[in-house]
Amino acid sequence: MKTIRIGVFGLSRGASFFDSILANNGEIVAVCDSRPKARQDAVDRLGGGVAAYETFDEFIEHPMDAVLLANFFPEHAPYAIRALEKNIHVLSECTSNGTMAEGVALVRAAEKSSAIYMLAENYPFMRFNQEMKRVYDGGTLGKIMYAEGEYNHPADWSNVSLVTDLRPGEKHWRNHLPRTYYVTHSLAPLMYATGSNPIRVTAMPVYAPLPDDCPSVSPVGDFAAIITTLNDDDSVFKFTGCAGFGGHGNSYRLCCKKGQIENLRGMGDTVMLRYNGWQIPEGMQEVQSYEARLSDKDAELSRKAGHGGGDFFVIRHFFESIRNQTPPPFDVYFATRMASVAILGHRSLMERGVPYDIPDFKNEEDRKQYENDTLSPFWGSDGSAPTYPSCSHPDYAPTEEQRAPMLAEFARRGIR
């Protein structure tokens, strides 16, 4: 088995992949992070043979077969493009592009490159999601008609220290993240299980700003977004981005012509499979609940990885694609389609549900429509201000009383 030499850019999230990389016969040859301590921690953990760089310009010149991009959420595309131009394989953590124009540029770069691009989306590889795909692929449920996906991640916003850990700075991307943007964890499992591709999106906001006594510097007063897509096979999906309501967790449901399958909220890897009473397959029951188990050769090994084993399978699929020169499960078209749902879904939300068609970036005509669309709710790495609102109520802003404890904590930590 060929050893894949890989570099890791961004060590907050990137370091959590180290064990999965090594378990899949990868060699981490270089790391990159602006923080000296993060670099030193990585060297201490991996050994003196790994090179550590402060800047991407230095890092990308290091000999490597592939790069894992784990830098800030909306800033992956420019770095992915630079790697692809050097024919370095790219595994991009989270979203593929922060603007529609970046999505166009990324697809064009991927098509010109001899390297493979894959989105490092891990939730489809959770055990219950792999079981749902296995059952759907088996055909006993029939064609998909409707599916749901939720990714719920509430937080204790009264905990100033915790919030500052996650959002270190008033201009940090998390403080400006629209609720539709972090969509991959809720949408990707549905697309992966069914093969359905969104072609039209509409979204509605759940506006619920934090209480006056809750510290915040974020201009996002939405607590969730409810997103709906029409897909290329006439099915419909309903899902959230990263929602702040309910208990922490994620849930999925596939409703098909002959029955449905879903994971049960709060029940670990338990799934419920139900067939219509008049369409029960031979040897099956009308209703059955059971724990999803993997028959995969690496099932036990994956249990040591994060996100229900998802991190392990992301690395394995990426490396297999490189070694076998086969398409990855989440290629550049899959990735940019999800990013388009996120970005255009937010525009729909801002217009109270006006639908937007999702472009197909395989088509040059669709690319041309968006190649100059640079609207963004985020502060740029060059200090440029957002060019699009991040909240369904653009005039919303936290009070000075809310801002004070956050600003004081930023000052205490030396964060600007």
Image: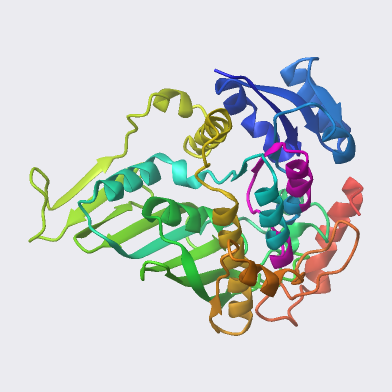
* Magenta-span inclusion, residue 80: yes
Say how the picture is coloured: rainbow
Report whether 109 appears left or right of 289. right
Q: Residue at x 48, y 61 (%)?
A: 246
Near-viewer residue (376 or 233) = 233
Q: Quadrant location of the C terminus?
A: bottom right
Position in image of residue 104 (x %, y %): 69, 62
Q: Quadrant location of the N terminus?
A: top right
Residue 153 in view here: no
Near-viewer residue (38 or 215) = 38
Residue range in magenta is 78-102
Residue 99 in view here: yes
Q: Residue at x 61, y 84 (%)?
A: 351
Q: Residue at x 86, y 31 (%)?
A: 53
Q: Is residue 16 placed above or below 359 in the rendered structure? A: above
Q: Is residue 324 placed above or below 231 in the rendered structure? A: above
Residue 218 lies in what quarter of the image? bottom right
Position in image of residue 89 (x %, y %): 67, 37
Residue 334 lies in what quarter of the image? bottom right
Position in image of residue 198 (x %, y %): 48, 66
Report whether 158 appears left or right of 353. right
* Magenta-span inclusion, residue 321: no
Q: Residue at x 86, y 37 (%)?
A: 35
